[in-house]
Amino acid sequence: MVGAEEREFEGILKRAGDISALPWQGAAFSRQAAWKNRRWFLIANGPGPRLVERALNQRPNVDRILSIGFCGALDPTLRIGDIVVSGEVPKGLQASFVQGDVVSVDRVAFTAREKCELRAATGAAVVEMESAAVAQKAREWNVPFGCVRVVSDVAGDDLPLDFNRYRDADGRFERTRIALAALGRPFTVLPRLVRLDRDCRRAAERLGEFLANCEN
């Protein structure tokens, strides 16, 4: 499973067994875990295709790749915590989901207007930053690819900040600068940032719950 941030795995790790450290050159976060009678590597290295490429610069012994994590809704009917599946659909599903296209862009779509424009241009259900790069690796390694994303912000909402302004030279989010920007606008940005954090926690829990209801 390849995500962008460690927190995207919170709901998964809560339900996984036999979690242990995984030495993985090029990844900011790496674990291995027992999940549904299989062994999974959990890898995250930050947002965007360049950091995916850096994390997946080695060919592990795997028989599939799953891109997971948060996404922004482009479809206005999607709500926080809704699951969108693209590519290979997990087997034995006992939970609801939407099967739809996912568009990857190397920036945060932070305004409702930008999401609307992406929806009109691509017809995709959601937007995120890594799955296209993960899919490319799956093609190179000749293994099946799947994408399971969970909505953390809806189509009609602007995000609290333009997070693109707070990425470092490698593309990672600079959390200290984000916190300072929020503290500088305590009555407008800070409450919305707190709400986004709550929505992300809810989304991570929903993702773990969904995957726990798949056969494998």
Image: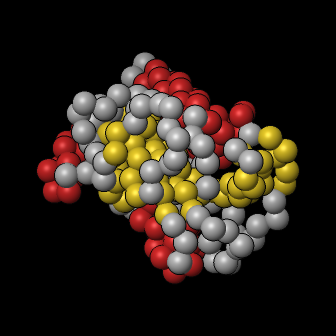
Tally of marks: 0
Horizontal and vertical percent position of residue 123 = 19, 52
**Which quarter of the rendering shows the N terminus?**
bottom right
Colour style of the rendered protein structure: secondary structure
Q: Nearer the viewer, residue 94 or 44?
A: 94
Looking at the rendering, which quadrant does residue 30 occupy? bottom right
Q: Nearer the viewer, residue 36 or 123?
A: 36
Q: Is residue 109 visible?
A: no
- Left or right: where 48 falls relative to 106: right
- Left or right: where 120 falls relative to 163: left
Q: Residue furthest bottom?
A: 140
Q: Is residue 45 above or below residue 215?
A: below
Q: Nearer the viewer, residue 205 or 200?
A: 205
Horizontal and vertical percent position of residue 80 = 41, 28
At 47% from the left edge and 23% from the top edge, which residue is drawn?
195
Horizontal and vertical percent position of residue 70 = 48, 43
- Left or right: where 36 falls relative to 92: right
At 46% from the left edge and 67% from the top edge, which residue is drawn?
135
At 82% from the left edge and 64% from the top edge, which residue is drawn?
23
Horizontal and vertical percent position of residue 98 = 35, 39
At 57% from the left edge and 63% from the top edge, which residue is drawn?
65
Q: Is residue 25 visible?
A: yes
Q: Is residue 115 above or below residue 153?
A: below
Q: Is residue 94 above or below residue 84?
A: above
Q: Residue furthest front?
A: 92
Q: Residue furthest left?
A: 120
